Image (cartoon, helix red, strand yellow):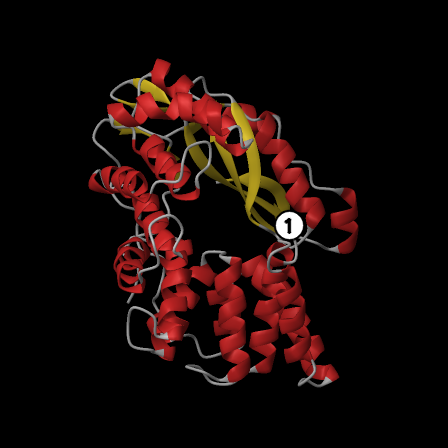
Amino acid sequence: MKARGPILGCMLLSTVGSASAADLQRGIEAFQQHDYAAALAEFRPLATEGITLAQDRLCLMYAHGWGVKQDGDQARTWCLKAVAQGFVPAEAHLGRLYLDGTGVGRDYTKAFEWLGKAAAAGDPAAQGNLGFLYLNGQGTPQDFAKAASWFGEAASRGNAYAQSNLGLMYASGRGLSKDFVAGYALLVLSSGTLDANTDVAGKSVRNRKMVADQMTPVQLEESQALAAQLQREGLLVAFKQHGIPLPEAMLDPGFTPPPAPAPPPGYFPAGLDLTYQQAHPAQFPREAIAAGHQGLVVVMARVQANGQVEDVQVSGSSGYPELDASAVAAVSSWKYTPCHINKQPVACYVRTPVNFALSAKPDAH
């Protein structure tokens, strides 16, 4: 049941030369801005050349009818081309398309097949969706224990939907020992993401109220404290410290996320300029020091082929907004050497931990 590998710490945008990398960058930016005509113009030739991320995006565009006429055959074709090159997100996207019936027609058996492959490779969204199939007995016999295990895998990697579903399983006692404190803490942990999504915000609020109505004031207080600890230290550490039984696949006391898959031949990751980082450290906010706030912030940044940083986001929150904001500001100004494949610079994503400790200056590892 354990995943074979987590999301790569440094994820390649694609194996491309510098000119194609610029085209891919423009396509990604247009796609994010919902300018699908411009995205299509960039992605189509790159996909034809075999660039997996472009193939994956064309799959989604044809499935949803974004900038093109909806075409399930084209969607499958492009996703399968990316899958054939080992691009795990395409497996996850194809499984989700079959799960929702978007463009390709609903097929729970195929959804289970593709989500299972992506989940085993460590894709958190696929792990959460696979748990959903086990929970409802769709494409596979219903199995609450396996549902909880996959929700647990995804929740430990920060997937808010899996955190919410796992919380409801703890609160109901389905597949797990019934525990309102653990369940409500997970619902609170996921609320920052789910409440911001208008499609699920109402359900997120109702679920918290439903569980809270069954709890005592003392339990609610304990649960809020546990939610804060979950943000700071993660699910595995917090639950083990409080003696909360973990889902089946996570019961191994020595459980740690499996190692990342081997990078492609000729690949060198981006490098942080430590001299520059030490000369421009993350600033420990005075209000955080005064309040005794400390914690680790994991920042995701896109490093362009020229080494410039952009699109900086919090991947793992410290639980304190002022620390998260300071980490983002710092990483936005730091310098990196770009990722390389066969000596060609390429754009990629990097995760940089920034630690704020009251006993030491904030640093990155």
- Between 328 and 79, the residue placed more toward the observer is 79
Question: Vertically, is 258 above or below 223?
Answer: above
Quarter assignment of residue 157: bottom left
Question: Vertically, is 24 above or below 63?
Answer: above
Question: Vertically, is 360 above or below 160?
Answer: above
- Between 160 and 332, the residue placed more toward the observer is 160
Residue under numbered circle 1: 359
- Can you see residue 175? yes
- Between 326 and 39, the residue placed more toward the observer is 39
Quarter assignment of residue 343: top left
- Between 70 and 317, the residue placed more toward the observer is 70
Rendering coords of residue 56 (x, y %): 34, 37
Q: Which residue is drawn at 72% across and 83% down?
A: 218
- Can you see residue 340? no
Rendering coords of residue 62 (x, y %): 38, 38
Rendering coords of residue 358 (x, y %): 67, 50
Please, what is the three-letter code of the amino acid marked with disc 1? Ser
Crowd class of label 1 (few under 14; some 14 to 19; many from 20; radius 10 Å) = few
* Dot 1: element: loop
